[in-house]
Image (cartoon, rainbow, N blue to C red):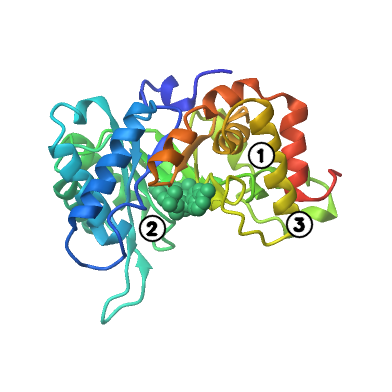
Amino acid sequence: MSLMPLEKRGITGSRLVLGCMGFAGDWDTGVIEKGELLEAERGLDTALESGITMFDHADIYKRGKAEEVFGKCLNNRAGLREKIIIQSKCGIRFADTENPGRYDFSKNHILGAVDGILGRLGTDYLDILLLHRPDPLMEPEEVAEAFSTLMESGKVRNFGVSNMNVAQMKLLQAYIGSPLVVNQMEMSLKKLDWLDQGVHVNQPAGLGTNFAEGLIEHCMLETIQLQAWAPLAKGIYSGKEDFMSAAEKETAELVARMAEEKETTKESIVLGWLMRHPANIQPVIGTTNPGRIQNCQDAPRQAKLMTREEWYKLYISSRSKRLP
Ligand SMILES: NC(=O)c1ccc[n+]([C@@H]2O[C@H](COP(=O)([O-])OP(=O)(O)OC[C@H]3O[C@@H](n4cnc5c(N)ncnc54)[C@H](OP(=O)(O)O)[C@@H]3O)[C@@H](O)[C@H]2O)c1
């Protein structure tokens, strides 16, 4: 398997990313509690011991508290900052007394959001900043100005996006001076539209598929790292057993059989399946549970070992329909 796009660009992120949305308790505005700090410390240390050196944040996660608790962990670990890759996101604004929940890619908002992120994380720079969800009012010139300011001040080293289609990425890329290096999308063994879009070309079955057309190929051509959010499908195939359909139950059983045969964990089969795709997708795992974080660490090896036949068995079991 070839290098992943981030490696080709000299950004030394691990094959798995730890998503930090789950840290810091509830989505309230309260202070960080001792138990929440301990949970984050255990999660971070387990990730590092499992070979994970890349961490995903967003300014909105737990209303800033997820970054704040991570910043406290960093502060307690001298010299760690330079050894890890931190990315965060901005551009979503919560509803307040006067305004609805909305998106905001204005220069002022982006610059202010990054200052807030850096303050909470207690760091001088972000390795990667992502725009979280497309803002219909995006003025690409304005975003370009914000990105130049952030790059020149050294506050952000690379830029990317999340939940964007090819046209939105191309529009932005036409104005900004540095390459977009990441697009983060929901992709998993449960959410299959990223594959169905391709296999349904010229098929009536494709009419109901809703994934950004051509995005996978665009990212492969342009050396853009595809990252998968919710890659564990919230644990449905690795122990949660909260099944919504017979296909989910059967797929969970298949995952369990494969894990047993290959002497690995269910999490590593689920993630290995995603990583087996030639786009070298980087899963952003959202578990805060140390045991489950450890269970993910064999995924890169399982991706290399997975045969075409095993990969298709999992895909077809989950989609619960034969291919056209
Ligand atoms: N760009 C975006 O728009 C976007 C959107 C959402 C998320 N994200 C990023 O993606 C990361 C991952 O997303 P995610 O957390 O939604 O998805 P995920 O990794 O698929 O699932 C993690 C969630 O599932 C639970 N889980 C996993 N295995 C389980 C099991 N066997 N039994 C019970 N519960 C289980 C975890 O709980 P435990 O913690 O208890 O294990 C956690 O709540 C986030 O942390 C965030 O960084 C990005």
* Picture disc at residue 128: none
For marks 2 and 1, the one nearer the N-term is 2
Q: Which dot, 2 or 1, sits closer to the camera?
A: 1
The residue sitting at 30% across, 78% down in the picture is: 99
| Quadrant, the C terminus | top right
Q: Amino acid at mark 2?
A: Met
Percent x, y for residue 318?
A: 72, 47
Residue 124 visible to an observer of this rendering? no
Q: Quadrant of residue 243?
A: bottom right
Circles 2 and 1, Cβ within 8 Å, touching? The answer is no
Residue positioned most to the top: 2
Report helix, strand or loop for mark 3. helix
* Picture disc at residue 256: 1
Mark 1 within 8 Å of ligand 1, using the beta carbon: no
Q: Nearer the viewer, residue 120 or 307?
A: 307
Mark 3 within 8 Å of ligand 1, using the beta carbon: no
| Rendered position, 96 above or below 229 | below
The residue sitting at 81% across, 54% down in the picture is: 205
Q: Nearer the viewer, residue 260 or 147?
A: 260
Mark 2 within 8 Å of ligand 1, using the beta carbon: no
Q: Nearer the viewer, residue 76 or 136?
A: 76
Report helix, strand or loop for mark 1. helix
Cα–Cα span, label 2 and label 1: 45 Å
| Quadrant, the N terminus | top right
The residue sitting at 71% across, 32% down in the picture is: 311
Q: Amino acid at mark 1?
A: Ala
For marks 3 and 2, the one nearer the N-term is 2
Dot 3 corresponds to which residue?
Answer: 246
Dot 2 corresponds to which residue?
Answer: 138
